[in-house]
Every structure is written in C-alpha cells, then in structure tokens.
Amino acid sequence: MNPIITLTSDFGLADHYVGAMKGVISRICPNAKVIDITHEIPLFNVYAGAYAISQAAPYFPAEAVHVVVVDPGVGTSRRGIAFRNQAGGTFIAPDNGVLTPFWPEQDRLNVRELTNESLWLSGHSITFHGRDLFAPAAAKLAAELIGWADLGPPVLDVVRLPNLKAVQGRGGQWAGTILSVDRFGNVITNLPSRIGLSPGFAVTAAGHEIRQFRRTFGEAAPDELFVYAGSSGYYEIGINQQSAAERLGVVPGHPVLLAVSA
C-alpha cells in the first residue's frame, strides 16, 4: 500500500518546517507518497488556503489524506480536526474554516476532534502543530495505525468562513469576496463565471471599477484592468504581464461587487 498524503501551508520553503513534517510522515508511514500542493499561501490567510485546497483536492484519489496548515490560531483553544468528505478524501486541519469549501450547509459532517494523546509527538510544541499533531495524525490514518473513531469525539459545530459564497442581491447585484491572488498577481474572486455579464457590467474592488471583459490576456490592451473567466469557474481580475492585485491594493478576504448590468 502506497497511500497519498498532501501538504498545503503558508510555511514557504526557506525554513525547516515543511521538511520536518515530511520527516514525521516518513517515520510513521514510510510507504506514503507525500505531495506538496503549495507552501506559498499568503501568511495567515485562511481564505487563500481554503481556495487552494478546494482547487487541488478533487483531482486526487478518494483515499488521499490532505493536511492543511494555515493556522494563525496555533497554540490557542482552537481545535485540531479530521474531516471525511462524502465525495472522497480525508482532511487534517485546524478548525478555523479552512475546510469550509467542502462542507455542505446542512448535512451532518463526518468530523472528529484530534484529542487522542497518542497522536502527538513526544515533547510536542504548542507552536508547531503541523509537525507535532497534524502530520502524525495524517500518517497514522494513512498507515491504518489508528481508527477513525479513535481520533477523538465528533465535532458538530465546525467553524465556517463567512462570505465564502457570493450572494445575489437585487437588480443584478452580487456581493462577493476575493478568494486568492496567484503568483502572477491575478485576483480570483468567488463570483461564479456562470453568472454571465452584459456589456454594461461593472466589477468593483477597493474603489476601482473594472468594466472590460477579455477572454484571454492576449486580447487586453497594455496596462488595462480587465475581468476574465478563470479556470476555477470564477471571475478573475487581471492585467496582461502585470499584477492586478498590486494595482488594486487587495488581498484575499477583501470584498468585491458585481453589477451584471449598468
């Protein structure tokens, strides 16, 4: 058996943090195939972490275990949790809303709090739960060294990120949120591209109004802010070969508005 464990974090690669987590996994489950989704989530940004894992996890086998460590509340009373998605996949993360994209609004969730003391590394730190709790929990699940029910008690009141889904208002108005900014500076919103835009549409972010739609970057004029339908199924804001995020001055979590027609 060669289980798959993925890692997503805001740790970056300049320090030892990612390597230490992989070391823990290799000792507990040496046959595991460890795949990095990204370690370049903007620091402490749970919205960007939620977006990243939601875009990557569906492309993995159903038995994969996904570890997500974007954790500004590490060391506090926030819980560590394990979650099993009905569509397949197991997730290990802090209970801070980073798994919200996988949670239906009303269905009961298959979530456990990581309270079993055997999950922790000996001499664990209160500031590095990625190494000392999340990595060993994932490895022990993948290696079938612990059962699902043995992780800890069920969790019925998980934390959900607010405004993760765009909300339709009156008169063709949509209130949304910026989910992520990619390394090119493209601004990814949660406005679904299925909405459709009329010629008089306007997207407003940080006081800037964008009224141009382009199918590709090559169609845009130099220095032009424009809206396009991104590969994730959302509208995005870009500038050809420049950073739209820097121009707008926005980060994940900031609001964005769409008027479908003027």
Image (cartoon, rainbow, N blue to C red):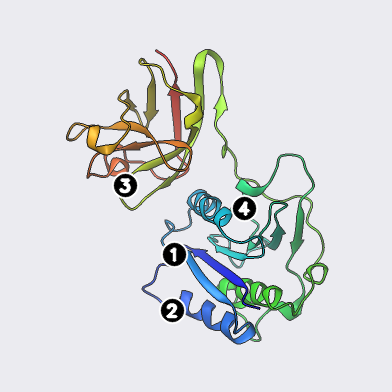
- Across and down, in percent, residue 249 comes to 32, 41
Please, what secondary structure does the residue beneath circle 4 have?
Answer: loop
Residue under circle 1?
A: 39
Circle number at residue 16: 2
Please, what secondary structure does the residue beneath circle 1 have?
Answer: loop
Circle number at residue 99: 4
The answer to whether residue 112 is left or right of residue 165 is right
| Picture quadrant of residue 153 | bottom right
Of the two numbered discs 1 and 2 in the rendering, the one whose residue sits closer to the viewer: 1
Mark 3 vs 1, N-terminal side:
1
- Which residue occupies 56% across, 40% down? 164
Mark 2 vs 3, N-terminal side:
2
Q: Distance from label 2 to label 3 (Cα)?
A: 27 Å
Mark 1 vs 4, N-terminal side:
1
Q: Quadrant of the N terminus?
A: bottom right
Q: Distance from label 2 to label 4 (Cα)?
A: 25 Å
